């Protein structure tokens, strides 16, 4: 059985600026040479896009503006095979993220949510054809989308579909009371987060201890550890760890999203943690080897 995943959340245009010097060497107030390119982005859009490079199907629920960026983003989804409906809204501009990438591949993001704000229950399609739902944490973190997203969660849970949740960045979570973020996690079946986010949510400095604490609120927890691979565990089972796949790192933008896509595509149908983590690592290795957070149309995993 192949997974058909509904991805809910942000769809962005990434403006990637690669610099040849470390950030502290930027000539502020003057010029610093760079290489600039534009790509589709946004966590939910990225996960949906990478899902199409697996044997899964993906449908995106999000918003883009009725502008040039929105047209480009919609066309990219069409080319990749991501299903969508009512993606473009009549007013507002598409969300944009300026991504600064340093010589080590590390990225710093400056997001403008744009049309992504204001998701509502009417955006949710009929759920009959899906067997998993991915939710980007950037959506409930947006106060204009939060009521609509919470209504979606209620309907999804009533339909008995498993919810996969990435709580998003520490910077984003800091804008909302920690107890509220934890209350969202208790509604989820699987959470996928990076080590920094796990430490922030638990106060632990050790990923393994953070994982055990997070399991008190969620049935299954996966912690992405970048070059150190990933760990995952479900209640009542043993912890599983996989290494990262060695590759030349060009750009880490979208690495966590691509990992989530690979993991969900496998785990949603097999419930095998080892196979899920390995699939996530495989897709993430392809992502970090290219510039941008999404696969090229011809990318094959």
Image: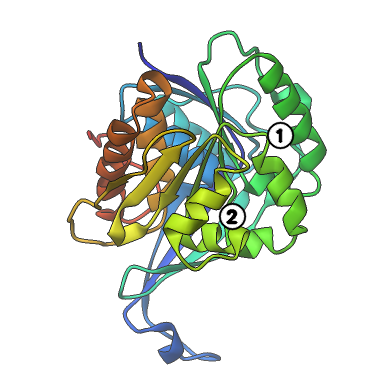
Pointer 2 residue: 96
Is the residue 48 above or below the residue 269 in the image? below
Residue 154 as seen in the image, left or right of residue 211: right
Q: Secondary structure at mark 2?
A: strand
Residue 226 lies in quadrant = bottom left
Q: Which mark is residue 89?
A: 1
Disc 1 residue crowd, few under 14, some 14–19, many 20+, Cα 10 Å: some
Residue 67 as seen in the image, left or right of residue 24: right
First of labels 2, 1 by sequence position:
1
Q: Secondary structure at mark 1?
A: loop
Q: Quadrant of the C terminus?
A: top left
Q: Position of residue 47 (x, y in %)?
A: 45, 38
Q: Residue at x 59, y 38 (%)?
A: 218
Q: Relative to the observer, which residue lies in front, 240 or 287?
A: 240
Q: Position of residue 160 (x, y in %)?
A: 62, 15
Q: Residue at x 25, y 37 (%)?
A: 299
């Amino acid at each position: 059985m192949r997974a058909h995943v509904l991805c809910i959340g942000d769809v962005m245009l990434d403006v990637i600026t690669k610099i040849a010097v470390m950030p502290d060497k930027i000539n502020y107030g003057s010029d610093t040479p760079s290489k600039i390119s534009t790509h589709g982005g946004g966590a939910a859009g990225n996960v949906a896009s990478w899902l199409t490079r697996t044997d899964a199907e993906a449908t995106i629920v999000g918003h883009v503006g009725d502008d040039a960026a929105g047209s480009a983003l919609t066309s990219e989804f069409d080319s990749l095979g991501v299903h969508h409906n009512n993606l473009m809204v009549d007013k507002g501009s598409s969300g944009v993220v300026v991504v600064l990438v340093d010589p080590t591949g590390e990225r710093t993001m400056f997001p403008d949510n744009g049309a992504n704000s204001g998701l509502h229950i009417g955006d949710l399609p009929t759920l009959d054809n899906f067997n998993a739902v991915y939710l980007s944490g950037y959506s409930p973190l947006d106060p204009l989308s939060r009521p609509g997203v919470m209504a979606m969660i209620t309907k999804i849970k009533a339909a008995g579909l498993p919810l996969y949740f990435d709580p998003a960045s520490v910077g984003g979570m800091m804008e909302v009371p920690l107890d509220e973020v934890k209350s969202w996690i208790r509604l989820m079946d699987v959470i996928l987060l990076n080590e920094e986010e796990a430490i922030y949510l638990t106060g632990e400095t050790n990923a393994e201890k953070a994982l055990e604490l997070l399991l008190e609120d969620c049935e299954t927890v996966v912690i992405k550890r970048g070059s150190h691979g990933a760990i995952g565990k479900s209640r009542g089972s043993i912890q599983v760890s996989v290494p990262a796949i060695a590759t030349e790192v060009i750009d880490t933008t979208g690495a966590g999203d691509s990992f989530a896509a690979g993991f969900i595509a496998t785990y949603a149908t097999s419930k095998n943690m080892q196979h899920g983590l390995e699939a996530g690592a495989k897709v993430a290795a392809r992502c970090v080897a290219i510039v941008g957070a999404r696969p090229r149309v011809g990318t094959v995993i």
